[in-house]
Amino acid sequence: MTTKLEVTLTRSLIGIKPGQKATAEALGLRKMNQTVEHNDNVAVRGAIAKVAHLVTVTEK
């Protein structure tokens, strides 16, 4: 059974560096308080680490 991660965008993407904005959008986060679910793997963890100050993560 794979672990799932719930990622919620808690801060706005306005004024954020273009690379961080692209990473958040690649995770599927486009609107404030939007939550998406991803499988827990190294690539997703790396993307989350890049935008850690913008998101909240919970394990499912």
Image (tube, rainbow, N blue to C red):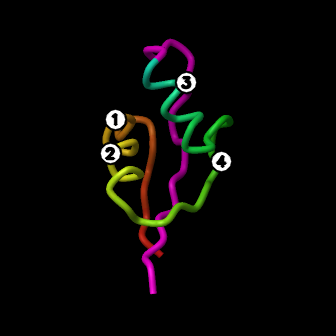
Cα distance in 3D space between marks 1 and 4: 18 Å
Residue topped by disc 4:
34
Rendered location of residue 52, percent (x, y)? 35, 40
Determine the image quadrant of residue 58: bottom left
Cα distance in 3D space between marks 4 and 2: 19 Å
Q: Amino acid at mark 1?
A: Lys
Q: Could you tell me what secondary structure mostly forms the magenta stretch?
A: loop
Q: Amino acid at mark 4?
A: Gln
Q: Amino acid at mark 2?
A: Gly
Of the numbered discs in the image, which one, if any, rests on residue 46?
Answer: 2
Magenta span has 11?
Answer: yes
Magenta span has 5?
Answer: yes
- Quarter of the figure that contains the N terminus: bottom left
Farthest bottom residue in view: 1
Cα distance in 3D space between marks 3 and 1: 13 Å
Residue range corresponding to the magenta coloring: 1-18
Cα distance in 3D space between marks 3 and 4: 12 Å
Secondary-structure class at tag 4 = loop
Question: Which residue lies at the image location 56% right of the left edge and 17% below the top edge?
Answer: 14
The first of marks 3 and 2 along the sequence is 3
Residue topped by disc 1:
50
Residue topped by disc 3:
13
Rendered location of residue 57, percent (x, y)? 42, 57
Numbered disc in front, either 4 or 2: 2
Numbered disc in front, either 3 or 1: 1
Rendered location of residue 8, percent (x, y)? 54, 50
